[in-house]
Image (cartoon, rainbow, N blue to C red):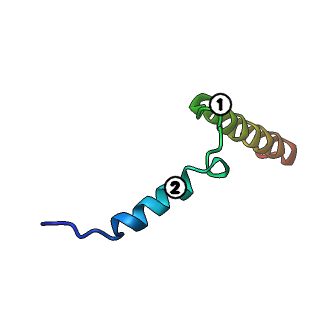
C-alpha cells in the first residue's frame, strides 16, 4: 500500500517553520516514573490506613 501525502511540500514547510518558533519549544523536566509510583503508593497506603482505622473505630476489626 502506498500512503498519500496529507500535506504538500509547501504546506509541510510552513508547518515546520511554525513549530520551530521558540513559543512551541518548551523545556520540560525528564519524566520521573519512580516519583509517580511513590506518590501513588503513598495515596493507596494512606487510604488503606484510613479504612483500617475507621473499621477499627466502628468495631469491625
What is the CA distance from the residue labelled 1 to the residue labelled 2? Answer: 36 Å
Q: Earlier in the sequence, mark 1 or mark 2?
A: 2
Q: Could you classify mark 1 by the number of other residues whose Cα lies within 10 Å: few (under 14), some (14-19), or many (20 or more)? A: few
Single out the residue that lies furthest toward the right: 57
* Depth check, front residue: 10 or 48: 10
Q: Is residue 10 above or below residue 54?
A: below
As drawn, 59 above or below 4: above
Q: Quadrant of residue 30?
A: top right
The local crowd at label 2, few if under 14, some if 14 to 19, many if 20 or more residues have their Cα within 10 Å, is: few
What's the mark number on residue 1?
none
Quarter occupied by the C terminus: top right
Residue 24 on image: x %, y % = 62, 51
What residue lies at 61% left-to-right and 34% top-to-bottom?
37
Give how far across and how far down residue 22 sits, in percent. Answer: 65, 47
- At 83% from the left edge and 45% from the top edge, which residue is drawn? 54
Residue shown at 60% from the left, 31% from the top: 32
Give me the disc on residue 35.
Answer: 1
Is residue 61 visible in the rendered structure shown here?
Answer: no
Question: Are circles 1 and 2 on residues that touch, CB within 8 Å?
Answer: no
- Quarter of the figure with residue 10: bottom left
Out of 29 and 40, give the one closest to the viewer. Answer: 29
Q: Secondary structure at mark 2?
A: helix
Q: Pick whichever, 5 or 61, lies toward us.
A: 5
Q: Of residues 48 and 37, which is closer to you in this image?
A: 37
Percent across and percent down for residue 34 are: 60, 28
Residue identified by numbered label 2: 17
The outermost residue toward the front is: 10
The spot of residue 18 in percent (x, y) is 55, 58
Quadrant where the N terminus is found in the figure: bottom left
Amino acid at each position: 500500500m502506498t500512503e498519500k501525502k496529507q500535506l504538500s511540500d509547501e504546506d509541510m514547510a510552513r508547518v515546520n517553520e511554525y513549530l520551530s518558533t521558540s513559543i512551541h519549544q518548551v523545556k520540560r523536566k525528564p519524566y520521573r516514573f519512580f516519583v509517580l509510583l511513590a506518590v501513588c503508593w503513598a495515596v493507596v497506603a494512606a487510604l488503606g490506613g484510613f479504612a483500617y482505622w475507621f473499621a477499627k473505630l466502628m468495631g469491625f476489626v
